[in-house]
Image (tube, grey):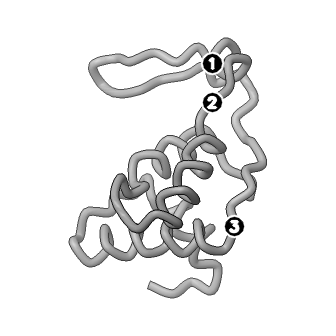
Amino acid sequence: MLLTVKERLLLLNILPREGDLSTIRIIAKLRASLSFSEEEHQALKFNQAPEGFTWEPSAPQTAEIDIGPKAQTVVRDNLDRLNSEKKLTEDYLPVWDKFNPDGTD
């Protein structure tokens, strides 16, 4: 799945920290895939500013991330949870659409 820097950061923030053993193993692999390599860090020049996290806009902004069916289900479940708690923000719309391609709300 082709993901932007922002989408990767958003997904890293919603992945669960607890669960059953097999799910946590899958999520650990997904977390590693979503994380940024040394080369990406160097190119993106991440910076923690008072108004939020920033990065170099001229650096490559997308990466192909392999997300298996179980990991997709976990992401979808967490997006659904945020939706039901009314904690989604506009930032999550592209992520929602990628994990709910049929447009279901």
Residue 37 sits above or below residue 32 on the image: above
Check whether the beta carbons of the residues at disc 1 and disc 3 lie within 8 A of each other. no
Q: Amino acid at mark 3?
A: Gly
Q: Which residue is mark 1?
A: 41
Tell me how far mark 3 sits from mark 2, CA to CA: 19 Å
For label 3, the residue is 68
Which element type, helix, strand or loop, lies under badge 1? Answer: helix
- First reached walking from the N terminus: tag 3 or tag 2: 2
Q: Which dot marks residue 91?
A: none
Taking the spot 31% from the left edge, 67% from the top edge, the residue there is: 82
Instruction: Of the two numbered discs 1 and 2 on the same chain, state the one appearing first in sequence.
Output: 2
Q: Position of residue 27 (x, y in %)?
A: 53, 56
Taking the image as shown, residue 37 lies to the left or right of residue 79, namely right
Task: State which quarter of the image contains the C terminus.
Answer: bottom left
Question: Which residue is rendered at x = 37% and y = 65% of the image?
Answer: 19
Residue 14 x %, y %: 39, 54
Q: Where's residue 84, x and y in %?
A: 26, 78
Identity of the residue drawn at 73% across and 50% down:
65
Residues tagged 1 and 2 counted as in contact (Cβ below 8 A): yes
Say which label, 1 or 3, has the lower sequence index.
Answer: 1
Pointer 2 residue: 36
How many residues crowd around disc 2 within 10 Å: few (fewer than 14), some, or many (20 or more)?
A: some
What secondary structure is marked by label 2? loop
Q: Label 1 amino acid? A: His
Q: Nearer the viewer, residue 19 or 71?
A: 19
Task: Residue type at mark 2: give it.
Answer: Phe
- Within 10 Å of the Cα at label 3, are there few (<14), some (14-19), or many (20+) other Cα atoms? few
As displayed, is residue 88 above or below residue 43?
Answer: below
Residue drawn at point x = 41 percent, y = 26 percent? 53
